[in-house]
Amino acid sequence: MNLEINSNDIVCGIMTGTSLDGVDIAFSKFDINNSLKIELLGYSTLPYPPSFSNYVKQLISNPNWRDISFLNYFIAELYQKAILFSANRFNLNISDIKLIGIHGQTMWHEPNGIELFNSKIPSTLQIGNASVLATKMGIPVVSDFRAADMALGGQGAPLVPRFDYDYFKSNNDNIVCLNIGGMANITYLPENSDIKDVIAFDTGPGNVLIDLIMKKYFNKEYDSNGEIARLGKINEILLESLLNDDFVKCLPPKSTGREYYNEEYLNKYNINGYDQVDILHTLTHFTSKSIEYNIKQFCKKVDKIIVSGGGVRNLFLMEILQSLFPSILIETSEDYKIPIDAKEAIAFAYMAYRTVNGLPSNIPSVTGASREAILGSLSFPF
């Protein structure tokens, strides 16, 4: 079956990230002649019910392969419902959607691998069965974007830097694209850069530890505007210990997830004896300062930082970031016509577009792969 996607075709991108807060979905058209141009037809976020988020978190912490297998099919049906609901909201005909790109829900990501039967084997698992979704929607689906890069010795992440480079690069400014989701990651785009000049990696936790403490102590899913954290003060002993974190300090390429930053991670620091609001305040500073450390350590010169992701809504977090970079302009992706919640969904739609057009999407200088690769597996609705 031949599949051609051009600038008149609608591509749907779906992202469910480590925040486990919902399904981000975007409908876009792409034109890559000379530079990347995007026509965003609509985007939405369908929140996960708290009970579902907690269910997935428990499965990540204590895997039950029977339940994970069922969840793999359930998430495909969840994606189907999200597409149908959102297409109807934006008055889009399903028949006009030519391609779907899904990242899938990450359950495990350990790119550095383990010794298994005398071989060093990396591992990553994103669920949401693409064949089920393709069959139910009658639309081809690109999925499993990380595997090809990891087969070439890469981290399989981050992948969004290809989008960052094509959309945000500048001839005049040294730019950091910062995404604060469950994890925080950066893409460094030196002025007038070539693709091989791009640096990108996870800096450490984004919202994940903040959200964990909010649930544990305050029975809330997140700290709205950072209002509770703002009431506390820094626990210097805790912050100093956190900032010695091995992942924060290690050299890129590097990527991480909930398999590392979780409740077990926090328990190593004996936080139960500390004031709860101070813990939250300190963790918000930890996220900010781990971002600061990595930007100052690995990005030579920075003129502006463009932030996306749910962390933008944590006003206290954003204020701390600005105080850490007083001479640098901090903007959001909204200033560039990319909604903060839609960037990664648009990016995976774009990568799906590149895949079916025979174009690579990984950046070896970012992931550590031995070469560029066309990413993903293509599922057809036969």
Image: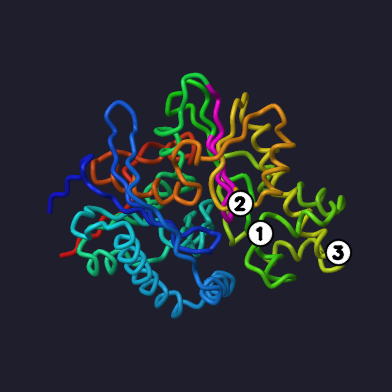
At a point 71% along the width and 49% down the height, the residue shown is 316
Distance, label 2 to label 3, CA atoms, is 26 Å
Badge 2: few (under 14), some or many (20 or more) residues near its Cα, within 10 Å?
A: some
At a point 48% along the width and 61% down the height, the residue shown is 106
Residue 274 has which mark? 3
**In the image, what residue type sits under mark 3?**
Tyr
Which badge, 2 or 3, comes first in the chain's sequence? Answer: 3
Task: Give the residues in magenta.
Answer: 173-187
- Which of the 4 quarters of the picture holds residue 381? bottom left
Which element type, helix, strand or loop, lies under badge 1?
helix
- Which of the 4 quarters of the picture holds residue 231? bottom right
Residue 251 image position (x, y, % from top left):
62, 39
Residue 117 image position (x, y, % from top left):
47, 62
Per the image, the residue denoted by label 1 is 224
Q: Is residue 365 magenta?
A: no
Quadrant where the image shows the N terminus:
bottom left
Tag in front: 3 or 1 = 1
At a point 66% along the width and 59% down the height, the residue shown is 224
Above or below, 280 relative to 172: below
Residue 233 image position (x, y, % from top left):
85, 53
**In the image, what residue type sits under mark 1?**
Ser
Q: Is residue 49 left or right of residue 100?
A: right
At a point 18% along the width and 58% down the height, the residue shown is 95
Q: Residue furthest left?
A: 1
Which badge, 3 or 1, comes first in the chain's sequence? Answer: 1
**In the image, what residue type sits under mark 2?**
Arg
Residue 313 has which mark? 2
Q: Is residue 183 magenta?
A: yes
